[in-house]
Image (cartoon, rainbow, N blue to C red):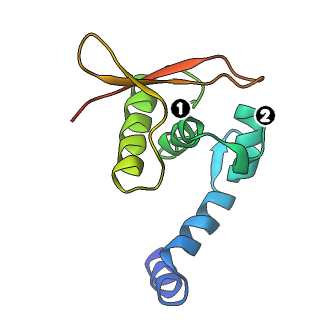
Amino acid sequence: MSEALVTWRMEKVLSKRRILELYLNVVEWGEGIFGIEAASRHYYGKPSSELTPFEATRLAAILPSPKRYNPLGDQRYVTTRANDIYNIMIQRGIIAPEYEEMNENGESSFVEEPSPSSPSKERRIPSD
């Protein structure tokens, strides 16, 4: 059965939200890491239900190539893509902005509160 036919059938029977849920629970997030729950526990040491918006966007950012990218690293692509996803989530009202401060360049930034298993992280969010 072709991928296009499978996709067409899925879209006829399932909501986009359910398709996304199924995908996130089977996709490979790194070498031998399958599903969002395993990825959350592997990278952040906690269940996916406890991920912060920052952590969730970092995981989402690696999906084009999870064996190439690492959500914990400082790869430019991951940082930029996670920032874009975060801003879209705020614009659509999916999440509330984290604590923000304006820096000397007029950019908003928020500081991720450290969890016991991860160091403090700071992200820059361009102001509109």
Mark 1 neighbour density, 10 Å: few (under 14) some (14–19) many (20 or more): many
Q: Which residue is identified by label 2? A: 45
- Of mark 2 and mark 1, the one earlier in the sequence is 2
Q: Which residue is identified by label 1? A: 69
Mark 2 neighbour density, 10 Å: few (under 14) some (14–19) many (20 or more): some
Q: Position of residue 48 (x, y in %)?
A: 71, 48
Q: Position of residue 75 (x, y in %)?
A: 46, 22
Q: Where is 59 relative to 80, above or below?
A: below
Q: Nearer the viewer, residue 32 or 113?
A: 113
Q: Position of residue 52 (x, y in %)?
A: 61, 39
Question: What amino acid is labelled 2 in the image?
Answer: Gly
Quadrant of res 104: top left
Residue most toward the top?
Answer: 104
Q: Nearer the viewer, mark 2 or mark 1?
A: 2
Residue sitting at x 37%, y 31%: 80
Q: Position of residue 100 (x, y in %)?
A: 42, 27
Q: Taking the image as drawn, is residue 33 in sight?
A: no
Q: Taking the image as drawn, is residue 43 in sight?
A: yes
> Relative to residue 13, is residue 36 drawn left or right?
right
Quadrant location of the N terminus in the rendered image: bottom right
